Amino acid sequence: IPFFLLSGYVFALAGKDKRNTKDFLKHLCKSLLVPTCFFYAFFYVLWLVAGRRLAGDAELWNVPLQEFIQGQFNVVLATYWFVISLFVMNLLYYALSKSQSHLLVALACGLMPVISLYCPLPGLFRLREAMLFIPFFAIGAGLYRLREHRTAYADIALCLLCLAVYCLISHHTDTAYYRWYEMLVGLALCAVVYLVAKAFGGGGGADRFVGTLRYGAIA
């Protein structure tokens, strides 16, 4: 959750929603897709040479390649599922941001976890995880906009309300993907990020601080 909050903040900080589609896709592929492909190829070769034998994996050599095409990392780089989710999340949020209504974007993002409870979603490219965590991405983006637009409070509140509805419904149906305490940790981080940004007066120091936290979370 903290990783997606910070990613949303960095998304708004970089003004990605204001870029044209071509520049946005070029930057997104360069920053997420290309490094992921490189690391996957590297660890796939390691898995073929030694990992499969040491781990006693009975998987065929082409299974990781199929998973890579489907965006489902289970055999190789399984712990990097969040990078694929972040890629899809960026695409979803960018598409929604073209509505020019931050409140509508917040509502759409907030309702996605609830929708995921009742709509069967394909497992490709971690779409379900992207829909489950995109409200936190939207809250992070809203935190950045708070420095200039007080109306962002309404966006954040709407996302939190939708998340509360999701937690109530999923708790009773025993399908919860994240719990209340995880949300509280995320919200505490939200408060820290906002206070730091406010203390720096919206200067570049706060932005560098948030960027460092985000890339530290990846590492």
Image: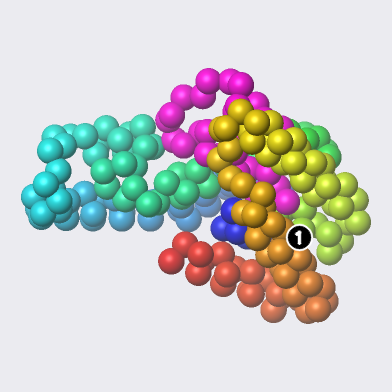
Q: Nearer the viewer, residue 176 or 75?
A: 176
The location of residue 58, given as percent across then percent down, is: 12, 38
How many numbered dots are placed on residues in this image?
A: 1
Main SS of the magenta part reads: helix
Q: Which residues are magenta?
A: 111-139
What crowding class fits label 1: few (fewer than 14 Cα within 10 Å), some (14-19), or many (20 or more)?
many
Q: Residue 99, position in %: x, y?
A: 77, 34
At 68% from the left and 39% from the top, the residue drawn is 167
Q: Which residue is mark 1?
A: 144
| Residue shown at the point (14%, 43%) measured from the top left | 57
Is residue 22 at least partly visible in the picture? Answer: no
- Look at the picture and state if 137 lies above or below 166: below
User: Is residue 60 covered in magenta?
Assistant: no
Give x and y (percent) for residue 39.
31, 55
Q: Residue at the spot x=75%, y=35% of the render?
A: 165
Residue 145, given in percent of the width and then of the height, sits at 80, 57
Foreground residue among 28 and 105:
105
Is residue 114 on the magenta stretch? yes
Q: Residue at x 30, y 35 (%)?
A: 67
